[in-house]
Image: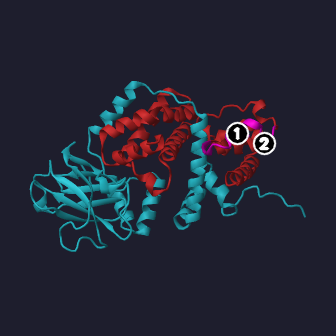
Chain colours: A cyan, B red
Amino acid sequence: MSRKPPSNPPPGGAPSADAAEYALGLMTENERAEFEARLVEDADLRAELAAWQTALADLAESEVAPAAPSPQLRKRLEAQLFAAPRASLWQSLWPYAAGGVAAALVLWAAVASDLLLPDTPLRPDLRSELAATPEGGNLSVLAAVDSATGRLEIVRLDGAPPEGRVFELWLIVGDSAPVSLGVLEGDTALLDLPETRRADLAGATLAISDEPPGGSPTGAPTGSVRAAGTLTAS
Amino acid sequence: MTPLEEIEDLLARVAMADRRAFGKLYDRTSAKLFGVCLRVLNDREEAEEVLQEVFVTVWNKADSYRVNGLSPMTWLITITRNRAVDRRRARKLPPAPIETADLVPDRRPGPEAAAMARSEQARILACLGELPRARAHLVRRAYLDGDSYADLAQATGVKLNTVRTWLRRSLISLRECLSR
């Protein structure tokens, strides 16, 4: 009996080829839906897809000639974007940072299918780049505050706490004592400033210290200050 | 900072609504991404519309790439290419003909392919070089030009299922080479 290759290869037969077909946009609508359902459950398949997307993007980087778009495009774009408030991404990422695997998968699916999650707009008006102190090594942190809502976004670009320690974030307004804003877990955080702490934020200092797990036992910084920066109007 | 780290850093700032970082990111990446759009759409006006949509997405979802584990450039190129392909399919543009020369089966990888293989980014090029030329051409058409199976069948005059079988086999060989 001769063995012919299946004329219509069933999805599931060769996961790598399926991932490649998905990355290339070669699947029918049904196949795509089926593949996306598998993606949600299969971390290996997600890694396989990422490997294909990376290899194919490398191909585009190597072989596609760059071409300058017209200068008007940038103006149109800025007019479109900056005329209206935008949704904050960190809010949709928050469930992921909090460790909700199911939420992360939902988010992943939303990203994959290009849906926007419902979001409240975040309009930061104060920003700070926290620079490392001599003890801070390569610690680099960005902060943005929407002082209307008291919402504070933190992104750690680089650096990690010493072994067995955690990072704690402090707010220092004027000459007042540092007030803890909490322990920073993960690369990103979204915090709500207490209502009593929302005044006089412009010019206030944000600082990060290293503390024992769980944070400072005293309510004041006990470890070294690792990074600090001033909030200024953006 | 390497160019890749710089783009990553800019994306982190864009995710926090930093307009200046957005401008810089546009300066660093728009020509590459516009090239990707043009290759698929072959029309400047359409390509600019797609590029505008892409940067709106980048502004709104600048941190998505962290979630699905892609490098920043991969994420940007993937979004751009997929948007351009969606546009092309919505327009039902016919595929370009495939030249006979593109399909002549020949050549094992030459010394230049082996040299390129040393660079991580060019690995895909070296691996495409290991495929029969006509098969490598189909892979490029599918990704860079955004051809569907129907487009490839029409352009080659081969039955769709046959094209699909060819391409899937080529992709499996390609993956084996990439993971070596």
Look at mark 2 in the image and give the residue it sits on: B132
Indicate the position of residue A158 as horizontal and vertical percent values. Answer: 38, 54
Which residue corresponds to the image point at 59% horizontal and 53% vertical from the top-left?
A: A51
* Disc 2 crowd, CA 10 A, few/some/many (<14, 14-19, 20+): some
Look at mark 1 in the image and give the residue it sits on: B115
**B120 to A149, vertically: above or below:** above
Indicate the position of residue A208 as horizontal and vertical percent values. Answer: 26, 59
Q: Is residue A119 visible?
A: no
Indicate the position of residue A60 as horizontal and vertical percent values. Answer: 58, 39
> What element does badge 2 sit on?
loop
> What element does badge 1 sit on?
helix
Residue most toward the right? Answer: A1
* First of labels 2, 1 by sequence position: 1
Query: Within the image, what quadrant is residue A7 found in?
Result: bottom right
Q: Quadrant of the N terminus of chain A?
A: bottom right
Q: Is residue B100 magenta?
A: no
Indicate the position of residue A22 as horizontal and vertical percent values. Answer: 60, 53
Q: Is residue A90 visible?
A: yes
Q: Give amino acid for label 1.
A: Ala
* Disc 1 crowd, CA 10 A, few/some/many (<14, 14-19, 20+): few
Which residue corresponds to the image point at 59% horizontal and 62% vertical from the top-left?
A: A45
Q: Is residue B151 left or right of residue A77?
A: right
